[in-house]
Image (cartoon, grey):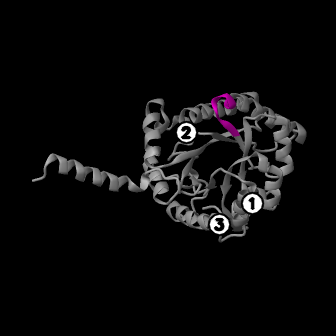
Amino acid sequence: MINRRDFLSASAALLAARYARFVPTADRLPLGFSTLGCPGWAWTQILDFAAGHGYAAVELRGLLTTMDLTRAPEFAPDRLDETKHQLAQHGLSISDLGASAQMHEMDATKRAAQLDEARRFIDLAHALGVPYVRVFGNNYVKGVPRDAMLAHIAAGLRELGGYANPKGVTVLIESHGDFTDSPTLLQIFSQADSPGVALLWDAHHTFVSGHEEPEDTVRQLGRYIRHVHLKDSVPAAATPGGRRYVLTGTGDVPVRRQVQALVTLGYRGYYNFEWEKRWHPEIEEPEIAFAHFATVATEYLHAAGVR
């Protein structure tokens, strides 16, 4: 027989043991991963893995088959409190929301749809207390002069920044697609001229596609960097794009130097792993790639003086 007091004490101990690793801690390094890397994982599996492997944040880029996060059940208005509670239980933050909105669209109807998606993501970020929403440039449109194209993208960003800033959200354009070099991005930021607009530095793309060394990119764009995507790759002629993603530190992308450049800058955001499993199902499974990144990125941060 066990009395009520002993039963409650034992139950509390079991509960504490179950959630011990999920208690928020101040000693986690600022590491995150994108859900782009685990398209087959449900929400609770994402949270459990992140907390269990020392991550501090997750970046939301789709959940299971739903890419539009504003339509995911976990983020329905009547589920938001529960979702926030689950994050708090696991000691996790959401670093940003990844929208698919593209600012290059010239057709008025298509452009309106892109801006509408971005606004819905901004509203969701505000409701969740998430600081950033990512959007794309994304491409040069055939027949549109370069300067006109950049002005068009900047105007869309300025409009979204004006909508987001009063809500405590910043819109981030990612260095992605046709916009991966610092001079072009600087021109966009100059024309957008908005406190609600900044940069998600995909450090892989500025190195591989923009042909910039990480120290040069950070020197030119550092004041705009709010969030980061890190990943590694090797040349692969038979692969679309001519590159194949590989485990961090095993390719030819200078990820260690990218981390060091950010630390030297005084960057205070998350070092986020973007493993593109959703688009490249042949690459390593997320449980392997995410665990590997946590180990390697921890080594890089420690070597750079981050403890």
Q: Residue at x 80, y 50 (%)?
A: 221
The image position of residue 104, as x and y in percent, is: 77, 38
The local secondary structure at tag 3 comes to helix
The amino acid type found where label 1 is placed reads Ala
Percent position of residue 145, x then y: 90, 40
- Coordinates of residue 175 in the picture (x, y in percent): 75, 49
Mark 1 and mark 2 residues within 8 Å of each other at the beta carbon: no
Sequence-first disc among 1 and 2:
2
Residue at 46 percent of width and 44 percent of height: 88
Q: Is residue 13 above or below residue 122?
A: below
Count residues near mark 3 (Cα–Cα under 10 Å), then give few for <14, some for 14-19, many for 20+. some
Mark 2 or mark 3, earlier in chain: 2
Q: Residues within 10 Å of mark 1 (few under 14, many from 20)?
A: many
Q: Is residue 91 left or right of residue 307?
A: left
| Mark 2 residue crowding within 10 angstroms, few (<14) / some (14–19) / many (20+) | many
3D distance between C-alphas at marks 1 and 2: 32 Å
Kindly identify which numbered label has been placed on residue 261: 1
Answer above or below: position of 156 versus 203. above
* Amino acid under disc 2: Leu
Q: Nearer the viewer, mark 2 or mark 3?
A: 3
Q: Nearer the viewer, residue 46 or 167?
A: 167
For image coordinates 64% across by 40% down, the residue present is 132
Q: Which residue is mark 2?
A: 69
The residue that mark 3 highlights is 300
Task: Establish if 189 lies above or below 27.
Answer: above
Reply yes or no: does residue 170 show up in magenta.
yes
Question: Which stretch appears magenta?
Answer: 164-171
Q: CA distance from mark 1 to mark 3?
A: 11 Å
Q: Amino acid at mark 3?
A: Tyr
Q: Nearer the viewer, residue 266 or 180?
A: 266
Q: Is residue 190 magenta?
A: no
